[in-house]
């Protein structure tokens, strides 16, 4: 089990690096250069490959092995970072955007392969909870490493040094995956299934609507689709815009990179880790009911801070506390959500499991991406206070949706107490 967690955690760590670079480096850089919140919000379009990944997920399911896809994509990320080391961000902003777009494209394909491997590797309730903790914690640790740690030293070390370091990180992980023994059984199964892939599944590849019918016919999928599209809406608006409010009124870019990029994300990792431990002891329905209510309460606190515009140590401390609590609960909710998604996927037949999980994960990204791209425009049009009232309303609506489902819908506790063996 430890080998599986290290393998998954490391792959999700390098997968989180592009997100950290884009979510922390670009907004601070663009805001410091005087760009509007609306324009900063539209940089989310660089995440677009994550929305499209469901289109090539069947290819990853049916062609080659997960090991080959993982080694190929991680090696591609190493080469992208190596070529990007020659860029100067001040003079080549479009080159920086192209780098992040390429990294997101490769990371999205890597995500399909590692999710498919995780669905096959993780067995039973205990492994499922710990495996999803490794997924969320690894991804966020990579984000903190890139968006907090590297951002804090980039002024001293320089852009080229940062990307050379990332080149060596990706190259090392590619070599690790190439020799990882946890995928040995997957290679054998891939060889045994090769004949069937050329047969019946090949017919499905020629008729993609059959695959979509199979995806939607998996028990629990319709509710899960609606849930993953909406569960982060209010939180995503607050998490995206509140740091920029602090940048305008209370903190410098360096302070914000530390408190939001390192400390708050550290709390997010703690929340994600706690989620895996709690899943081993309690039903997911009971956990989700309580955590979603707590998230709504925390957003009330954060919204009240928007009325304070004068800088003060007390305000700065309350802002850090608010971000930390919000990230802690967000991390906990993310682990619960990805466990719910993987449980739903394990009900699908093996030939479409990676595609099914990628379908759900794509919708999860689409929901967050669409709203975070529009959140800046909402703030520019209506102001921070009205916008955050809207975010709070969305969060309360999601809490009600989850609360209802734990009693009468797809999250009825008895459905998630036992995991497949």
Image (cartoon, rainbow, N blue to C red):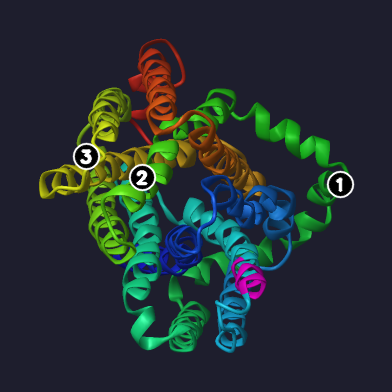
Tell me the residue that label 3 is attached to.
Answer: 278
Which numbered circle lies on residue 151?
none
Q: Is residue 192 above or below residue 211?
A: below
Q: Is residue 363 left or right of residue 236?
A: right
**Disc 3/disc 2 C-alpha distance (Å):** 34 Å
Looking at the rendering, the stretch of residues picked out in magenta corresponds to 93-100
**Residue at the top extreme, as displayed:** 408
Q: Residue at left 28%, top 40%?
A: 326
**Residue at the front extreme, as displayed:** 310
Tell me the residue that label 1 is attached to.
Answer: 203
Q: Position of residue 420 (x, y in %)?
A: 42, 39
Q: Nearer the viewer, residue 72 or 116?
A: 72
Choose the circle earlier in sequence order: 2 or 1: 1
Q: Are marks 3 and 2 in contact (CB under 8 Å)?
A: no
Q: Residue at left 20%, top 36%?
A: 281
Mark toward the viewer: 1 or 3: 3
Q: Could you tell me if residue 71 is visible in this image?
A: yes
Q: Could you tell me if residue 421 is visible in this image?
A: no
Q: Residue at left 45%, top 70%?
A: 14
Question: The residue tagged with tag 2: helix, strand or loop?
Answer: helix
Q: Is residue 257 above or below residue 363?
A: below
Which numbered circle lies on residue 245?
2
The secondary structure that dominates the magenta segment is helix
């Amino acid at each position: 089990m430890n080998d599986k967690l290290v393998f998954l955690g490391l792959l999700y760590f390098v997968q989180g690096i592009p997100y950290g670079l884009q979510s922390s480096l670009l907004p601070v850089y663009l805001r410091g250069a005087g760009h509007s919140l609306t324009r900063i919000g539209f940089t989310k379009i660089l995440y677009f490959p994550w929305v499209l990944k469901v289109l090539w997920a069947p290819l990853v399911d049916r062609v080659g092995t997960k090991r080959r896809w993982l080694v190929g994509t991680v090696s591609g990320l190493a080469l992208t970072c190596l070529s990007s080391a020659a860029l100067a961000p001040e003079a080549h902003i479009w080159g920086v955007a192209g780098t992040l777009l390429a990294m997101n494209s490769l990371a999205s394909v890597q995500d399909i392969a590692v999710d498919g491997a995780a669905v096959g590797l993780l067995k039973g309730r205990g492994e499922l909870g710990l495996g999803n903790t490794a997924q969320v914690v690894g991804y966020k640790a990579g984000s903190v490493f890139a968006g907090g740690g590297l951002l804090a030293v980039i002024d001293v070390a320089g852009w080229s040094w940062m990307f050379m370091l990332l080149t060596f990180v990706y190259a090392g992980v590619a070599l690790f995956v190439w020799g990882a023994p946890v995928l040995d059984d997957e290679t054998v199964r891939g060889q045994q299934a090769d004949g069937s892939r050329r047969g019946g599944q090949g017919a499905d590849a020629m008729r993609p609507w059959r695959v979509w019918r199979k995806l939607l016919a998996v028990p629990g999928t319709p509710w899960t689709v609606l849930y993953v599209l909406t569960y982060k809406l209010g939180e995503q608006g607050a998490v995206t815009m509140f740091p920029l409010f602090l940048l305008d009124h209370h903190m410098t870019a360096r302070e914000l990179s530390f408190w939001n990029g390192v400390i708050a994300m550290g709390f997010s990792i703690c929340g994600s880790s706690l989620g895996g431990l709690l899943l081993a002891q309690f039903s997911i329905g009971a956990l989700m009911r309580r955590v979603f209510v707590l998230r709504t309460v925390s957003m009330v606190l954060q919204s009240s801070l928007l009325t304070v515009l004068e800088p003060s140590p007390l305000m700065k401390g309350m802002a850090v506390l608010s971000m930390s609590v919000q990230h802690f609960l967000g991390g906990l909710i993310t682990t619960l959500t990805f466990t719910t998604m993987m449980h739903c996927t394990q009900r699908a037949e093996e030939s479409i499991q990676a595609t099914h999980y990628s379908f759900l994960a794509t919708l999860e990204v689409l929901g967050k991406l669409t709203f975070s791209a529009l959140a800046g425009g909402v703030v520019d049009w209506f102001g921070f206070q009205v916008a955050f009232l809207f975010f709070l309303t969305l969060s309360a609506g999601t809490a009600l949706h989850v609360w209802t489902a734990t009693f009468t819908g797809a999250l009825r506790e008895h459905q998630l107490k036992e995991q497949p063996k």
